[in-house]
Image: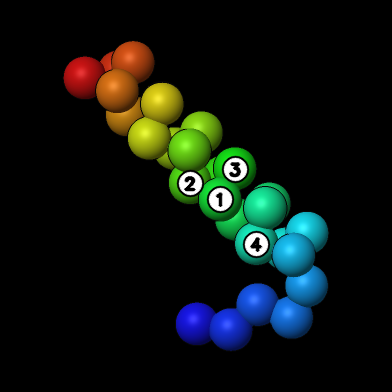
Amino acid sequence: MKFDNPHELTKKTHTYNEKIKYIYLCS
């Protein structure tokens, strides 16, 4: 998996964290 720019990586990481939080809260 290649990330050309750090902002994209940050955005993907943030989305992943939000998803984990959502799953955690809804479980």
Residue under the point 60% across and 55% down? 12
Q: Secondary structure at mark 3?
A: helix
Cβ–Cβ below 8 Å for labels 3 and 2? yes
Cα distance, mark 2 to mark 1?
5 Å
The vertical placement of 25 against 9, above or below, is: above
Q: Secondary structure at mark 4?
A: helix
Cβ–Cβ below 8 Å for labels 1 and 4? yes
Q: Amino acid at mark 4?
A: Leu
Q: Amino acid at mark 1?
A: Thr
Cα distance, mark 3 to mark 4?
9 Å
Q: Earlier in the sequence, mark 2 or mark 4?
A: 4
Q: Residue 16 — which label? A: 2
Q: Position of residue 6 (x, y in %)?
A: 74, 65
Which quadrant holds the C terminus? top left
Q: Position of residue 16 (x, y in %)?
A: 48, 46
Q: Secondary structure at mark 1?
A: helix
Q: Amino acid at mark 3?
A: His
Q: Position of residue 20 (x, y in %)?
A: 38, 35
According to the image, label 3 marks what residue?
14
Cα distance, mark 2 to mark 4?
11 Å
Q: Residue 13 — which label? A: 1
Cα distance, mark 1 to mark 4?
6 Å
Residue under the point 59% across and 43% down? 14
Q: For the residues carrying marks 2 and 4, which lies nearer the camera in this image?
A: 4
Residue under the point 51% across and 33% down? 18
Cβ–Cβ below 8 Å for labels 3 and 4? no
Q: Earlier in the sequence, mark 3 or mark 4?
A: 4
Cβ–Cβ below 8 Å for labels 2 and 1? yes
Cβ–Cβ below 8 Å for labels 1 and 3? yes
Q: Residues within 10 Å of mark 3 (few under 14, many from 20)?
A: few
Cα distance, mark 1 to mark 3?
4 Å
According to the image, label 4 marks what residue?
9
